[in-house]
Amino acid sequence: MGFTRRDLLKWAAVGTVSAAAGSAMAEDDEFVANCDDNYGVLVDTVVCIGCRKCEWACNNEHKLKNADLESFEDKSVFEHHRRPTDDAYTVVNRFWAPEQNDKAYTIKVQCMHCNYPACVSACIVGALSKSNIGPVDYDAWKCIGCRYCMVACPFQVPAYEYQEALKPRVRKCTFCKERLTEGRRPACVSICPNEALTFGTRDELIEVARERIRSHPGKYVDHIFGENEIGGTSWLYLAATDFTNTELPTLDSENIPHRTERIQHGIFKSFIPPIALYGLLGLIMQSKPDNEEKEEEDVSAS
């Protein structure tokens, strides 16, 4: 059954209302929440030994690769910088502390599960959402594969299943949400042999990090990465060197959705919402065949 012009007008109106509603939600800053009560993880790069057991645990939990634990003992991977992929939600990389004669340290990277996720703000279909316990969730059923989330993420974390021709998905660390709801810690935290990964609520972890800095002033730089960066993240970091020497980006405290949505509102404030434009274009395209049919009927009648 084809669409009539009445149907197209109806959907154009719905599109206009939906776009306006979406703008109103953004203006209300839908990401605001008491994120200090959310779960988080403190990554202490000073005590991390680069064993890569966290990589194996994540791989095993999500059934990403059929690889045994021994295969993750290979440290030659540190010779090249790596980033999370569609079949490796977390990776461990190496960095150096110049002020300590280039002493080597290792750092685990994964989705930061931001308090104000840029990926959530960028997603035009709501496939990404911020959970009220911490994780940034992904709904593959809603995803249309636009990959705006990949562009928006300041940590360059989301990966795409390019090899999946029919059902490609965006892949990233899930924060082991299923385990959290069962009262268990994330798989990577559970296997860490020397507590380089500490699980807890975000406010608790910030206090733990501050105490470590106070107790060992020469061991850590006085900076908890993720406490304030882009409005805060669920994953927090300690290091023995300035974070510019790590792979973590230099970011200010303003959250990205707040910044980008100001731009979006400025662009669309005086214009017709995009969905309404699409509806109008559809109406024009549909009316052309209708007009042609009417002309043919007139010719036949004459």
Image (tube, helix red, strand yellow):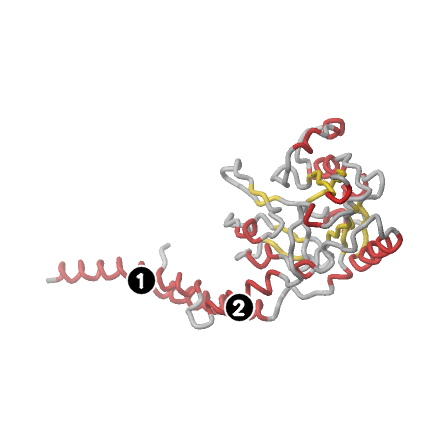
Q: Camera-side residue: 132 or 36?
A: 36
Q: Residue at x 76, y 55 (%)?
A: 224
Q: Residue at x 72, y 40 (%)?
A: 96
Left or right position of 195 against 266: right
Q: Residues within 10 Å of mark 2 (few under 14, many from 20)?
A: some
> Tag 1 or tag 2, which sits nearer the N-term?
2
Q: Quadrant of the N terminus?
A: bottom left
Residue 44: percent from left, percent from top: 79, 46
Label 1: state its secondary structure.
helix
Residue 263: percent from left, percent from top: 51, 65
Q: Camera-side residue: 255 or 191?
A: 255
Point out which mark residue 23 bears: 2
Residue that mark 1 sits on: 284
Q: Is residue 191 above or below residue 287?
A: above
Which of discs 2 and 1 lies nearer the camera? The answer is 2
Q: Camera-side residue: 144 or 148?
A: 148
Q: Badges 2 and 1: C-beta atoms under 8 Å apart? A: no
Left or right position of 129 against 165: right
Determine the image quadrant of residue 255.
Answer: bottom right
Label 2: state its secondary structure.
helix
Asked if residue 218 can be seen in this view, the reply is: yes
- Amino acid type, label 1: Ile
Left or right position of 118 against 286: right
Q: Residue at x 82, y 42 (%)?
A: 47
Q: Across the whole image, how many numbered discs are drawn on residues? A: 2
- Amino acid type, label 2: Ser
